[in-house]
Image (cartoon, rainbow, N blue to C red):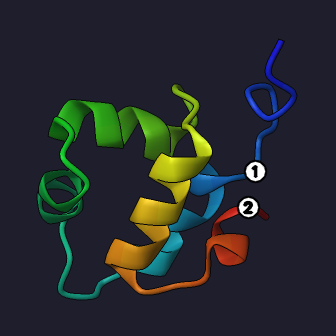
Amino acid sequence: MDPLASRSTGPSATAPRTRGDGPLTQEMVAHRVLMDRSTYIRIERGQSSVTLDTLLLIAHVIGVPAADLIG
């Protein structure tokens, strides 16, 4: 079992807040990390877990340290 999969923190907890009202939409972030918008939305909502590589890529795209997305 993935120990991070059951955590309520992570991208789902901070990505929307970090994206905030900035210039990046969910669609733009999803496109830049090479995934469907629906997949990215599930990640933001905490309905899907991500690999470390994906977490790092999302952090890079939205311009924050990966640690900021973990909690």
Q: Quadrant of the N terminus?
A: top right
Q: Tell whether 58 sits left or right of 29.
A: right
Determine the residue positioned at 73% across, 73% down: 67
Where residue 18 sits: x, y (%)?
49, 78
Mark 1 / mark 2, whichever is N-terminal: 1
Kind of element beneath mark 2: loop
Residue beneath label 2, please?
70
Q: Quadrant of the C terminus?
A: bottom right
Q: Tell whether 5 sits left or right of 22.
A: right
Mark 1 nearby-residue class (10 Å; few <14, some 14–19, many ≥20):
some
Instruction: Single out the residue that lies furthest toward the front.
Output: 53
Per the model, the C-alpha gap separating discs 1 and 2 is 6 Å
Q: Amino acid at mark 1?
A: Thr
* Front of the two marks 1 and 2: 2
Q: Tell whether 33 sits left or right of 51.
A: left
Q: Nearer the viewer, residue 65 or 38?
A: 65
Residue beneath label 1, please?
9
Where residue 50 sits: x, y (%)?
54, 37
Where residue 12 sits: x, y (%)?
57, 49
From what the image shows, is residue 9 above or below residue 46? below
Q: Amino acid at mark 2?
A: Ile
How many marks the image carries: the answer is 2
Determine the residue positioned at 25% across, 54% down: 33
